[in-house]
Image: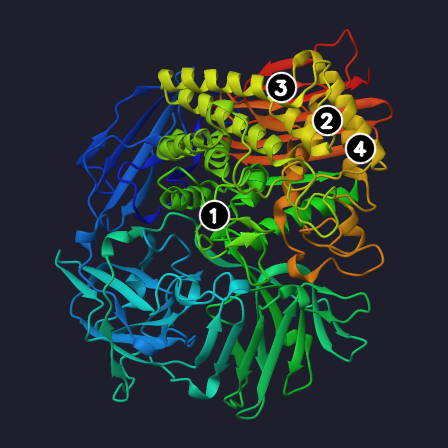
């Protein structure tokens, strides 16, 4: 029997408000049979659930494609629901049943919008961080079939309908390049409407649009100086008629109890100013003021592309601490992003004041110096409700583990506090466990680094006055992120912003969305503008990684000109010489071989920049090949050959010595295949020597660390790779764990062995970049990877590389075709391997440490496989 599951349109289950005019469909096959391969599929699309009138029928298509099958029917219409159903046949002709799902289009062009942007703020609002209310009353006269709200804001908004909060998303509409792209959200509000009088309302806050950004340089109003709302409600009645409710100048506005709300600084809320039931028809608005139109081009408004940020988890307090200074501090036991929700009972006008921190100092006191100018403070003024009051913030979030209660009008009961974890809503895909509990904790820390920083954009850190989408951090971590969560739509959205921010000359900003260009003038007395190697290469590395992990050719098509433009920019910098020695580069940022007091590692920028140039060109050649652009493929292959030759002539002596004697130089040369083949062994041996000279530790920074274990394991030095992984003294991945870390640190010695802190000007304890080792855990220790020529795990490569200091590892990955599992264990001289391959894929299982007589590689189809043998 052949069945289907996880039938999706654009990676979503029954989505509403999609913007893809040619949406794609995917499904997974389930069966108790083995070696199941889809031979044919059929897709049908209709506007009726019964499929009496079929809009598009693919017919019976001979294909094993079951991921991202493109709709090829007539043009889809805005705000219309479509039903689709799929049926498949396997290689033996066995057919599944029909499986039916639906998708619903959003507003597809600016002509579909009938409302205007309206604002409650006047010209004096630029420096004000308070939030405002907007509301509008309307009548429903007939029986409703469906009702949808499409909403966005300049700023952040929360939507209300008849006194109830609409939707589960927070921090809407998310952060994009607001100058060119502003997402709107779609809500099903059918059940919230009633016959007769209704009221729709919104609360507006500053958010990323007009609030503080890049706080260390004091920048605000980057995109605009007034908040505004754009909203449109479509009501379709049972009789076939419809009604539109839109934002217009008849909407009324008022101040809210949110006196102050900023992403970096927190929120001040005066509950005495609450207007109970303000978004209901019964409320008297006689004291409210009219709103006014804000001139904003609606053509920038687009359907939501990435996953919404939502409340994901609730953490209970671990303990209440009294520090040596007498501070009352709640320990939630986990560094995270979100906020505290609390209950309180007290008198009118009494205050609660909460401050947030990641760590305690060496003496055990509350430590906030590393927050820089970010205040991370929540202030709540009680209204005096005898039944008690509950509060959580609206338009801010904090990065914290510890919360200091500076003011609280009652006995502190931990049952009244909980931490709300927020991040972009992404399906959990990867699970890794092994026999070493410190490594298991490292894996947890890597995951929490992702959860804390994937808040609509991949930020560097969630606590201080920064929280920006640094391109370098994103590109080194993206492969790890794809193991841990389904990040496809998250990065698709971010890469579209990157594309929109690319400069005319092909350069790429340091952060996406770009709020730093022309703000930062100098770093270390060097002119700073854009396009640092290893950072801007995100334009090439990230689309290719998404293609590899999800098999999504469309993202390569979308990003191809951006990728190509980046390589052309580098070519304009290097000229015929092909050695990139111009411009500003972060280089091997924060490497331990840096000079005292410097952030810049010892590896010369011309080596790192030329190495990444070669890597990006190599990816471009492969991308052009995938897209069938033979001419570009040939040009990029020729260019890559030339760069490699120049690199070898510049940085290798005739006898094969790499002239730059740093770990990162050797790592990059090996990783990007820049070492002359006859000198590869010498290069690997020298890397081992450099590690030994550093007492068996790494000294790499942002550009070398992600690859160091990988180049060791790929070159037959698995023992040395494990030795780096398992080190627990400074510097190492496990050292922070010995200091109680629950996330990845920005610096190897964020807290030094003596308990003192690294310099407070840049010392985050929740900074995922060094968590890029997660890729190696999954691919080498766990043993699961995809094939480059059959990406998206269409062909799975099981290739674990165990080492005697571990006795087992178990890895699971939910790939586009289903669950992939690999378990290995060593017991009494025997190796045990268990592998599970989802249907409609193939796999190769490489058995480690076999005897000479054993078959080492097994090519298999879907099913479960077990191997047991004596170690060779």
Q: Position of residue 500 (x, y in %)?
A: 36, 45
Which residue is painted at 72% across and 78% down in the image?
A: 328
Give above or below for 303 relative to 465. Answer: above
- Secondary structure beneath disc 4? helix
Q: Earlier in the sequence, mark 4 or mark 1?
A: 1
Residue designated by label 1:
529
Mark 4 vs mark 2, CA separation in Å: 11 Å
Q: Which image quarter: residue 405?
A: bottom right
Of labels 4 and 1, the one closer to you: 1
Residue designated by label 2:
712
699 sits left or right of 821 in the view: right
Mark 4 vs mark 1, CA separation in Å: 35 Å
Mark 4 vs mark 3, CA separation in Å: 23 Å
- Secondary structure beneath disc 1? loop
Residue designated by label 3:
648
Q: Which image quarter: residue 329?
A: bottom right
Q: Earlier in the sequence, mark 1 or mark 2?
A: 1
Mark 1 vs mark 2, CA separation in Å: 35 Å
Which residue is at the front of the view, 867 or 288? 288
Mark 2 vs mark 3, CA separation in Å: 20 Å
- Secondary structure beneath disc 3? helix
Residue designated by label 4:
691
């Amino acid at each position: 029997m052949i069945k289907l599951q996880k039938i999706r349109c654009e990676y979503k289950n029954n989505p509403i408000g999609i913007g893809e005019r040619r949406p794609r469909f995917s499904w997974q096959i389930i069966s108790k049979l083995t070696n199941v391969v889809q031979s044919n599929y059929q897709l049908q699309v209709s506007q009726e659930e019964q499929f009496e009138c079929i809009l598009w029928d693919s017919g019976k298509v001979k294909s094993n494609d079951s991921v991202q099958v493109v709709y090829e029917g007539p043009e889809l219409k805005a705000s219309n629901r479509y039903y689709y159903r799929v049926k498949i046949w396997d290689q033996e002709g066995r057919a599944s049943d029909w499986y039916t799902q639906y998708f619903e289009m959003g507003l597809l062009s600016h002509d579909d919008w009938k409302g205007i942007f309206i604002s409650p703020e006047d010209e004096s609002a630029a420096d004000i961080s308070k939030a405002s209310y907007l509301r509008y009353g309307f009548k429903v006269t007939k029986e409703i079939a469906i009702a949808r709200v499409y909403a966005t804001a300049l700023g952040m908004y929360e939507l209300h309908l008849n006194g109830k909060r609409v939707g589960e998303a927070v921090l809407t509409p998310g952060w994009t390049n607001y100058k060119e792209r502003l997402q709107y959200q779609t809500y099903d509000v059918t059940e919230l409407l009633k016959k007769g009088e209704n009221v729709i309302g919104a609360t507006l806050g500053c958010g990323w649009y007009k609030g503080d950004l890049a706080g260390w340089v004091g920048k605000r109003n980057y995109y605009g100086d007034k908040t505004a709302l754009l909203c449109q409600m479509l009501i379709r009645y049972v009789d076939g008629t419809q009604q539109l409710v839109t934002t217009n100048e008849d909407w009324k506005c008022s101040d809210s109890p949110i006196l102050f709300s900023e992403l970096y600084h927190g929120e001040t809320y005066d509950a005495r100013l609450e207007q109970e039931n303000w978004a209901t028809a019964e409320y008297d608005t006689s004291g409210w003021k009219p709103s006014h139109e804000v001139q904003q081009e609606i053509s920038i408004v687009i359907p939501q592309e990435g996953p919404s940020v939502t409340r994901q988890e609730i953490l209970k307090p671990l303990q209440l601490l009294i520090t040596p200074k007498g501070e009352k501090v709640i320990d939630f036991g986990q560094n995270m992003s979100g906020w505290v929700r609390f209950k309180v009972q007290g008198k009118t006008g009494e205050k609660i004041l909460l401050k947030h921190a990641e760590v305690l100092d060496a003496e055990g006191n509350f430590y906030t110096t590393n927050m820089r100018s970010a205040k991370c403070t929540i202030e709540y003024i009680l209204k005096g409700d005898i039944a008690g009051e509950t509060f959580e913030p609206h338009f801010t979030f904090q990065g914290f583990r510890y919360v200091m209660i500076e003011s609280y009008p009652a006995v502190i009961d931990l049952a009244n506090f909980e931490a709300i974890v927020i991040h972009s809503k992404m399906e959990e895909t990867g699970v890794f466990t092994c026999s070493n509990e410190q490594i298991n904790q490292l894996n947890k820390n890597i995951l929490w680094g992702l959860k804390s920083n994937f808040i609509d954009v991949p930020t560097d850190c969630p606590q201080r006055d920064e929280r920006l989408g640094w391109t370098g951090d994103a590109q080194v971590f993206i492969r790890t992120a794809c193991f841990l969560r389904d990040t496809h739509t998250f990065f698709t959205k971010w890469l579209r912003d990157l594309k929109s921010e690319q400069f005319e000359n092909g350069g790429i900003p340091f952060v996406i969305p770009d709020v730093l260009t022309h703000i930062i003038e100098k770093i270390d007395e060097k002119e700073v503008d854009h396009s640092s190697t290893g950072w801007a290469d995100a334009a090439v590395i990230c689309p290719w990684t998404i293609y590899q992990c999800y098999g999504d050719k469309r993202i390569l098509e979308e990003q191809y000109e951006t990728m190509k433009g980046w390589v052309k920019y580098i070519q304009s910098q290097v000229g015929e010489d092909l050695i990139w020695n111009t411009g500003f580069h972060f280089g091997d940022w924060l490497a331990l071989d840096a000079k005292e007091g410097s952030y810049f590692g010892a590896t010369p920028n011309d080596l790192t920049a030329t190495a990444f140039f070669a890597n990006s060109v190599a990816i471009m050649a492969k991308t052009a090949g995938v897209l069938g652009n033979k001419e570009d493929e040939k040009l990029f292959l020729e260019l890559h050959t030339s760069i490699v030759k120049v690199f070898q002539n510049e940085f290798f002596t005739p006898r094969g010595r790499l002239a730059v004697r740093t770990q990162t130089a050797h790592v990059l040369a090996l990783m990007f295949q820049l070492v002359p083949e006859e000198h590869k062994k010498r290069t690997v041996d020298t890397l081992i020597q450099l590690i030994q000279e550093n007492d068996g530790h790494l000294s790499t920074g942002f550009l070398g660390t992600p690859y160091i274990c990988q180049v060791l394991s790929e070159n037959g030095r698995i023992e040395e790779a494990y030795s780096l992984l398992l080190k627990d003294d400074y510097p190492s991945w496990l050292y922070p764990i010995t200091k109680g870390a629950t996330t990845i640190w920005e610096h190897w010695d964020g807290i030094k062995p003596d308990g003192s802190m690294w310099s407070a000007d840049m010392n985050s304890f929740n900074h995922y970049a060094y968590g890029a080792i997660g890729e190696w855990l999954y691919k080498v220790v766990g043993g699961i990877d995809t094939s480059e020529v059959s990406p998206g795990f269409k062909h799975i490569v099981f290739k674990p590389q165990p080492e005697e200091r571990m006795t087992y590892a178990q890895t699971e990955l939910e790939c586009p075709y289903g669950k992939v599992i690999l378990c290995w264990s060593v017991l009494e001289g025997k190796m045990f391997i268990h592998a599970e391959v989802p249907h409609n894929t193939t796999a190769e299982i490489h058995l480690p440490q076999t005897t000479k007589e054993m078959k080492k590689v097994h090519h298999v189809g879907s099913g479960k496989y077990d191997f047991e043998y004596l170690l060779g």
